[in-house]
Image: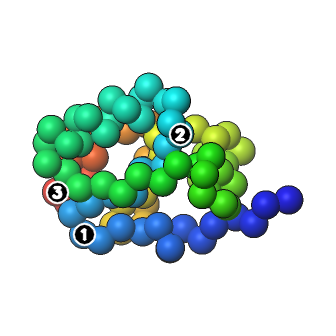
Amino acid sequence: MAQTADITAYTPDAGSITMFSTSWCGYCRRLKSQLSADGIGFTEVNIEETPGTAELVEAINNGNQTVPTVIFPDGTNATNPSAKEVKARLAG
């Protein structure tokens, strides 16, 4: 059984987010494109390549590996948020 990653290791700096994704996720590609267009910084973590992160996403999403899952600087998270929601939550 894989070790679950520690969420605090993925908590981003103020003004940016951490986005858990996969290479094949269309919702992830769309959100990345929208965030880039809005000038919102993000760190992408591929849950298929980074040990423990698929389990972390499962823990956040009640047993589902749903992406994109986003971590905000205050340690809260959102699953498949819109760029508008991300922008609003970062604004405070």
The numbered mark, 3 or 2, whose residue comes first in the sequence reads: 2
Residue 29 in the image: above or below residue 77: above
Q: Residue furthest right?
A: 1
Tag of residue 30? none
On the image, the x and y values in percent for residue 76 come to 43, 60
Residue marked by disc 2: 22
Q: Quadrant of residue 91?
A: bottom left
Image quadrant occupied by the N terminus: bottom right
Q: Secondary structure at mark 1?
A: loop
Labels 1, 2: front one: 2
- The Cα–Cα distance between marks 3 and 2, rounded to whole angstroms, is 27 Å
46 on left or right of 36: right
Q: Secondary structure at mark 2?
A: loop
Image quadrant occupied by the C terminus: bottom left
Query: Mark 3 Cα within 10 Å, few/some/many (few <14, many 20+)?
Result: few
Residue marked by disc 1: 14
Tag of residue 91? 3
Question: Which three-letter amino acid code belongs to the residue tagged 1?
Answer: Ala
Coloration of the structure image: rainbow
Residue at 15% across / 38% down in the picture? 37
Q: Quadrant of residue 31?
A: top left
Please say if the residues under marks 1 and 2 sit with CB atoms less than 8 Å apart.
Answer: no
Query: Mark 2 Cα within 10 Å, few/some/many (few <14, many 20+)?
Result: many
Query: Mark 1 Cα within 10 Å, few/some/many (few <14, many 20+)?
Result: few
On the image, the x and y values in percent for residue 57 come to 60, 51
89 on left or right of 57: left
Residue at 67% across / 40% down in the picture? 64
Question: Which three-letter amino acid code belongs to the residue tagged 3?
Answer: Ala
